[in-house]
Image: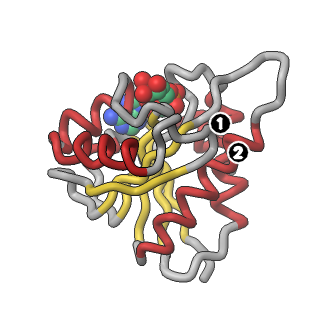
């Protein structure tokens, strides 16, 4: 199925979607930015699920570019898909890892049967990725994807300037 792609300006924790993607870190134990907001608003069930995943599968952490799903707690979603974006490097091209975050998150959500998924602009905050390129990488993967169940992917941009830059990339 061809995925319908929407760009919206807003707070990802206020979105209604089957799956909400978290720009996490490899510890899966929370942090700032989107990660902090998701855990704050989603409540302790998400952290509890992350802790148990760590214990069972990710004792050494979730690798960059990978994704794993938990409950969405109190969010208006069924699942949170946690993925770990690469830290921006001015010298090394890590864009394949960034694209892998989108591709893996899509696959995880699709396998769960999600029809709608909301993404933040992974790596474009604390991890320092330039917004225009982060949006370009996201759109490349979303446009190429042919999921089984997913019908809509929403890229949720935080703030007017980020939205403007991302929308410019979408053309
Ligand atoms: N809704 C939507 N977008 C948001 C929100 C929100 N509530 N809050 C921030 N953004 P970031 P990263 C935007 O820093 O760069 C955490 O500590 C933000 O403006 O959340 O992948 C993790 O634990 C930016 O455009 O994620 C990791 O350690 C985008 O979301 C690290 O930060 C991503 O910013 C991950 O850094």
Quadrant assignment for ligand 1 = top left
The location of residue 171, given as percent across then percent down, is: 69, 50
What residue is shown with label 1?
134
Where 90 falls versus 79 (above or below)? above
Q: Residues within 10 Å of mark 1 (few under 14, many from 20)?
A: many
The tag on residue 137 is 2
Beta carbon of the mark 1 residue lies under 8 A of ligand 1: yes
Where 128 falls versus 70 (above or below)? above
Q: Quadrant of residue 106?
A: bottom right
Beta carbon of the mark 2 residue lies under 8 A of ligand 1: no
Asked if residue 36 can be seen in this view, the reply is: yes
The tag on residue 17 is none
Using the image as rendered, state which of residue 108 and residue 14 is in the foreground. Answer: 108
Q: Quadrant of the N terminus?
A: bottom right
Q: Quadrant of residue 114?
A: bottom left
Q: Residue at x 54, y 38 (%)?
A: 84
Q: Residues within 10 Å of mark 2 (few under 14, many from 20)?
A: many
The location of residue 132, given as percent across then percent down, is: 67, 33
Asked if residue 159 can be seen in this view, the reply is: no
């Amino acid at each position: 199925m061809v995925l319908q792609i929407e760009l919206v300006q807003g707070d990802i924790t206020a979105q209604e979607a089957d799956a909400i993607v978290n720009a996490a870190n490899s510890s899966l134990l929370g942090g700032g930015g989107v990660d902090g907001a998701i855990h704050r608003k989603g409540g302790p069930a998400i952290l509890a699920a992350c802790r148990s995943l760590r214990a069972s599968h990710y004792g050494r952490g979730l690798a960059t570019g990978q994704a794993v799903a938990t409950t969405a707690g109190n969010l208006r979603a069924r699942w949170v898909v946690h993925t770990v974006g690469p830290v921006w490097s001015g010298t090394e091209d890590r864009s394949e890892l960034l694209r892998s975050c989108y591709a893996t998150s899509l696959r995880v959500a699709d396998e769960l049967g999600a029809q709608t998924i909301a993404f933040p602009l992974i790596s474009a905050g604390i991890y320092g990725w330039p917004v225009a390129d982060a949006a370009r990488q996201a759109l490349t993967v979303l446009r190429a994807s042919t999921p089984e169940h997913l019908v809509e992917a929403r890229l949720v941009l935080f703030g007017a300037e980020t939205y403007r830059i991302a929308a410019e990339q979408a053309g």
